[in-house]
Amino acid sequence: MESTTSTSRDELLQAIKSWKPVIFMHENADLDALGSALALSEVFDLKVSSFGGLDRFAKAFSESHSIDIEEIKPSEVDAILLLDAPTTRFQHQGRVIIIDHHSLISQDQEEEALRYCDPTRGSCSEMVYELVDDKELGHDTVIALLAGILSDTGSFKYSDLRSIETYMAISRMYSILPKEVYETFNIPKPKGMRSAVLKAAQRLQFEKYKGFYLVRTQVSAFESSVAMSILGMGTDVVIVASQREDEVRLSGRANRKAVEAGVHLGNLFGEMGTEIGGDGGGHDGAAGLVTKGDAEAILNISITKLKKQF
């Protein structure tokens, strides 16, 4: 997919300097979003917020390094910088900057937003680093950027050479060894995660379609971790749903074979979000959807639409 960047690097940097936007990360923000936010915040002295908390790795990192993620509503500020959040729906009447490495799907991202987006990049962290590579960054920020690149590229399994080159350039510049970055992921698994994986395996349904194994299942929590675990069992595509009252969360994972056959879970969930309401999107092999309704019915819709991608 070609780059969708619609503004130049110089125009973007000038807007950030003059507008002083508040950075907003996506819901359940990961290390890629956090690392990108920390770098921009440090260089331009910007506040950082999130549309809905941090994932367990980003949360552990922020707590261990005393990083302050403020609770701010977009409606309370004049300008926002939407970072690594391609489908987040927001209400904001002021100026908007979007920096992302996903395809832009949400129709709520108004046309007048200043966009700096490239879905060919493996992570937002590498894009942001290239924006500020002429500035000196703090040690914690550098570690978060490197962890963000590793996280979103699956330790380079889903990257091109640019991700590896950017990672190596940062590592050399700041003399960071891999073991220090990998320590970021060395945190205890939450209670209940292992049992969630086992219960999901008990409940899973699978079918073989055009030579590919498609799996669906439901859990009460940890849908992303469960999806990754089940993909490791040898399936080609897995979609995991969780139901919390009327809210339904879907997490999907696909292996390289399925992606090369045409599967793009980010597009699948983005289209579903537009059609049935909700926020959906991500990468070809890893994506998510938050919507409302019945988990079983939405799982069925996702599998039906998934088959059309092959």
Image (cartoon, helix red, strand yellow):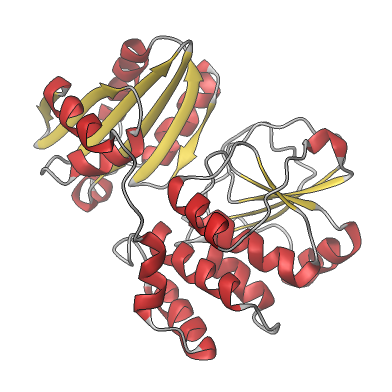
Vertical position of residue 127 compared to residue 61: above or below = below
Name the quadrant containing residue 258: top left
Name the quadrant containing residue 44: bottom right
Image side of residue 95 versus residue 8, left or right? right
Vertical position of residue 19 compared to residue 179: above or below = above
Image side of residue 36 versus residue 109, left or right? left
- Nearest the viewer among 101 and 227 is 227
Count of numbered circles in the view: 0
Q: Residue 50: percent from the left, percent from the top?
A: 65, 43
At 80% from the left and 65% from the top, the residue drawn is 45
- Nearest the viewer among 105 and 172 is 172
Q: Residue 264: percent from the left, percent from the top?
A: 36, 42
- Nearest the viewer among 292 and 303 is 292
Vertical position of residue 201 compared to residue 6: above or below = above
Q: Residue 49: percent from the left, percent from the top?
A: 70, 46
Image side of residue 211 versus residue 86, left or right? left
At 55% from the left and 55% from the top, the residue drawn is 63
Vertical position of residue 43 compared to residue 26: above or below = below
Name the quadrant containing residue 100: bottom right
Quadrant in which the C terminus appears: top left
At 18% from the left and 39% from the top, the residue drawn is 230
- Asked if residue 243 can be seen in this view, the reply is yes
- Asked if residue 118 can be seen in this view, the reply is no
Image side of residue 86 versus residue 243, left or right? right
